[in-house]
Image (cartoon, rainbow, N blue to C red):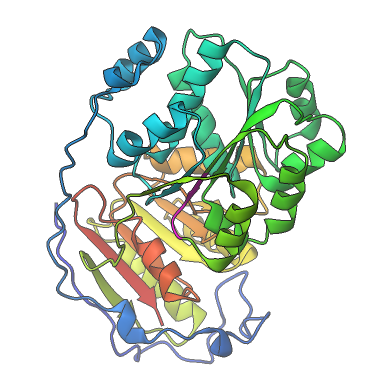
């Protein structure tokens, strides 16, 4: 397999001209806000032709999973999933969560944080045998789905149940599932608030609250919904908050929802320095499409994640690439949850090797073996850029990223 990194089309001139028609579904004027005003990142930040060697630090845990006193069925399910030793965030968080402490966990995507809070929650439900319930709130449907999948795998043969409450799925089916009394509710803020307001989701017995990817929820404008939900919960509860960063907004939220929390910080700096990066000049959207198809024609572009800015343009790009012989799936906010999940599964399982996504839709997703990330539309901040390109070059594998300018 050829993984060499070769910069291309640095001049952007040649047969592409401003007078040629943009590709189908795109407007030559761009529409929306003034894009030139929204871009504040120097193009130099998109270039790294000499990536550093990326070596994952081997963590030596203080505990084994057996040390936590988990129920035998949990231990059996850990073994089935191939879990041998806890990751750092699991190792440091689980004892405090089992002890009933409020916890703030700072960790990167892919660090194993879902198991860090799901496993002690399962232990608590199984051993206490009360009617208390758990509420897990996430910023995106996909992340909620991922947490539910892990919950089901860890609770195999334990007769514990969860309900997924997210937009894009039939709300009446969710109301019906809630009537069955699941021990765990996993969902996004808007749908949870809606179900609470309808009286379908009652929170008076919710004694454990988890906010996952809290910084993203605030970035996406969910703070009013979160505050409304928290106001409906019992004061006597355990609250767990996992986030990549502690912004002033996050700190204000934590000050109101946590009691004497334990801080667990296992976050490592995401610089993208181990990922080869370059820019591609293109003066028109047609030129961008032609350059993109040239890249996708190369054998080493094995599993490619392409980021676009707008929901409609992401969908149009996926349709256009498919029409040109590059089968693609799209994931964005205008799709229903089953459609988004099918697209994601197709990409993860290799049925298609190109996924076009908005930045928001792809947040929190841990997709293995992405060979290339392509920013078809530039991100607005350098932090977002680093987050996007961090979808490649994972687990010590080489990664390559390109940005159109």
Q: Is residue 146 left or right of residue 77?
A: right
Residue 351 in view here = no
Q: Is residue 377 left or right of residue 403?
A: right
Residue that lies at the very extreme toward the front in this rendered image = 260
**Is residue 264 in the magenta section?**
no
Front residue of 29 and 244: 244
Q: Residue 252, located in which quarter of the rendered image? A: bottom right
- Between residue 40 and residue 251, name the one nearer to us: 251
- In this rendering, the answer to whether 366 lies above or below 314 is above
Please state the horizontal and vertical placement of residue 302, each as a whole percent of the image.
28, 51
From the top left corner, tell me how far across and down residue 180 is, in percent.
74, 15
Report whether residue 357 is seen. Answer: yes
Q: Position of residue 235 (x, y in %)?
A: 70, 37
Q: In which quadrant will I find the C terminus?
A: bottom left
The image quarter containing residue 351 is top left
> Measuring 62% from the left and 69% from the top, which residue is drawn there?
25
* Image side of residue 294 versus residue 1, left or right: right
**Residue situated in front as seen by the camera: 248 or 222:** 248
Answer above or below: position of 108 versus 278: above
Which residue occupies 70% across, 42% down? 168
Residue 10 % position (x, y): 28, 86
On screen, 367 above or below 388?
Answer: above
What range is drawn magenta here? 241-245
Q: Main secondary structure of the magenta part?
A: strand
| Image quadrant in which you'd find residue 165 | top right
Q: Please name the residue shown 61% across and 74% down the image.
A: 26
> Residue sitting at 51 percent across and 25 percent down?
121
Q: Residue lying furthest right in this view?
A: 198
Q: How many marks?
A: 0
């Amino acid at each position: 397999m050829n993984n060499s990194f070769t910069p291309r089309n640095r001049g952007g001139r040649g047969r592409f001209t401003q007078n040629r028609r943009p590709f189908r579904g795109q407007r030559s004027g761009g529409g929306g806000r003034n894009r030139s005003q929204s871009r504040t990142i120097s193009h130099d930040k998109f270039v790294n032709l000499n990536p550093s060697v990326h070596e994952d630090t081997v963590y030596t845990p203080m505990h084994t999973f057996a040390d936590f006193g988990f129920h035998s069925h949990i231990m059996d399910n850990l073994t089935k999933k191939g879990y041998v030793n806890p990751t750092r965030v699991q190792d440091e968080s689980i004892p405090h969560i089992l002890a009933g402490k409020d916890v703030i966990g700072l960790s990167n995507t892919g660090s194993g944080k879902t198991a860090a809070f799901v496993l002690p929650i399962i232990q608590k439900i199984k051993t206490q045998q009360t009617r208390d319930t758990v509420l897990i709130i996430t910023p995106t449907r996909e992340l909620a789905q991922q947490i539910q999948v892990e919950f089901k795998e860890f609770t195999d043969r334990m007769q514990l149940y969860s309900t997924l409450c997210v937009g894009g799925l039939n709300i009446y089916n969710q109301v019906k599932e809630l009537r069955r009394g699941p021990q765990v509710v996993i969902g996004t803020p808007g749908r949870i608030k809606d179900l609470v307001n309808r009286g379908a989701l009652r929170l008076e017995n919710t004694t454990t609250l988890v906010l996952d990817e809290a910084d993203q929820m605030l970035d996406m404008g969910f703070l009013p919904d979160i505050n409304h939900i928290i106001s409906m919960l019992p004061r006597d509860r355990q609250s767990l908050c996992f986030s990549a960063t502690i912004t002033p907004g996050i700190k204000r939220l934590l000050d109101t929802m946590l009691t004497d929390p334990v801080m667990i910080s296992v976050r490592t700096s995401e610089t993208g320095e181990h990922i080869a990066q370059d820019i591609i000049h293109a003066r028109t959207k047609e030129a961008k499409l032609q350059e993109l198809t040239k890249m996708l024609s190369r054998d080493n572009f094995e599993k490619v994640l392409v980021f676009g800015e707008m929901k409609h343009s992401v969908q149009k790009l996926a349709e256009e690439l498919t029409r040109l012989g590059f089968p693609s799936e799209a994931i964005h906010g205008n799709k229903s949850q089953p459609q988004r999940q099918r697209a994601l599964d197709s990409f993860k399982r290799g049925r298609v090797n190109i996924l076009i996504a908005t930045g928001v839709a792809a947040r929190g997703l841990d997709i293995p073996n992405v060979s290339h990330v392509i920013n078809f539309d530039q991100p607005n901040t350098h932090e977002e850029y680093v987050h996007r390109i961090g979808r490649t070059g994972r687990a010590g594998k080489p990664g390559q990223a390109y940005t159109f300018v």
